[in-house]
Amino acid sequence: MSVVRRCTGRIFGIWMALALAGTAFAQAVQPSGGAAYPTKPIRLVVPVSAGGGTDIIARFIGQRLTDRWSQQVVVDNRAGAGGSIGADIVAKSTPDGHTILLGSIGHITFTPALFLKLPYDPQKDFAPISLVAEQPFVVAAHPSLPANSIKELIALARSRPGTVNFGSGGSGGASHLGIELLQLMAGVSMVHVPYKGTGPGMTALLGGEIPILLVGVATALPHIRNNRVRAFAVSGAKRSQALPEVPTIGEAGVPGYAFDVWYGVLFPAGTPRPIVGKANAELVRLLKAPATAERFLSLGLEPLSSTPEEFAALIDREIPKWKKVVKAAGIKPN
């Protein structure tokens, strides 16, 4: 009888081990494990209106991922409240890898400084996948400005505090906060003149209404080349491929200054790590393709990729930095 029990126990143990192994295998090939991902169409939420730079990036990436994964990537524009409406949709979506946010520096790291209450936490409610692009900005000056470089601009602003104007595409936007960061680091005070968009700001600069504008390289480049405006410096940590002869602001007199508008993709928090890893690998492959570089550079963008951890660390660094800038600028959060 004991022999029978022992044999029965052994058989049961083997059966249980095989059952557990089968369960583990089944889980490994399910969507939660990443191997079978994606299993249905993917919603790529863009928190701005159709037609802008963020939307163009989303549609380019979406089409390439559709081709690669044989699942339709549907771009869903959800504009409003500084990008927080679209971001909140993704933050509250099922974390199965089938809803993605294409956000930018403004939607992820500006909003905590500009809004008293957000319906989501940019640091806790998303699983960063990868950065995808950056847009270098340039400090563009009207020829009438009695300065020829960043150093001379700073000296002028110090000698005439509160009298040198600078324009922007709107209060709290990239062109505004980038100059506020410059003022904070250089210890100067200029007067902000906001316009309703980059286009009107650029028109004001060309007409001499304002002497300084921080603007995307792609927007300013034609006017720099025909000598209608002067390029003092680019805002990023490295020189722009479109303006390799123009120094960075850090090189030109404000060490440590670095500001680019970046774009990145994020899942809702809780998305399984294998899915995050698979999406990251696919995006990095796409972003390193020559066709991507060619397309992005034609738009004034530069391809940029990262690990999920690097992207998360960037968000963690930038949120307190921009809160400090907004406070120093006297901008009251909404």
Image (tube, rainbow, N blue to C red):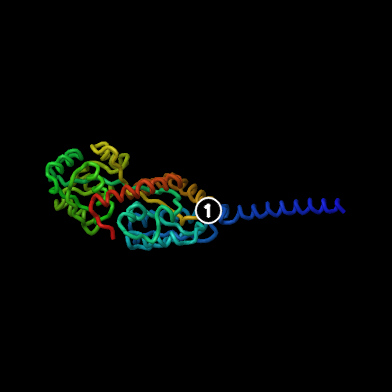
The residue that disc 1 covers is: 272
Q: What's under tag 1, amino acid-wise?
A: Pro
**Mark 1 Cα within 10 Å, few/some/many (few <14, many 20+)?**
some
Q: Is residue 83 left or right of residue 4?
A: left
- For the point 22% across and 43% down, the residue is 231
Image side of residue 275 versus residue 3, left or right? left
For residue 37, which quarter of the picture?
bottom right
Residue 93 image position (x, y, % from top left): 46, 61
Residue 265 at what x, y percent from top left?
A: 42, 53
On the question of residue 257 being in view, the answer is yes
Give the tally of numbered discs.
Answer: 1
**Horizontal relation, residue 332 to residue 98: left or right:** left
Instruction: Using the rendered image of the protein, determine whether residue 298 is visible from the camera's viewpoint.
Output: no
Give coordinates of residue 244: x percent, y percent.
29, 38
- Seen at 59% across and 56% down, the residue is 30
Q: Which quadrant holds the C terminus? A: bottom left
The secondary structure type at the circle numbered 1 is: loop
In the picture, which quadrant includes the N terminus? Answer: bottom right
Q: Please, which residue is most extreme toward the front here? A: 2
Please say if 155 is above or below 168: above
**Camera-nearest residue between 95 and 118:** 118
| 237 and 181: which is toward the camera | 181
Seen from the viewer's position, the closer of residues 182 and 238 is 182
Tell me residue 249's x, y (percent).
Answer: 26, 40
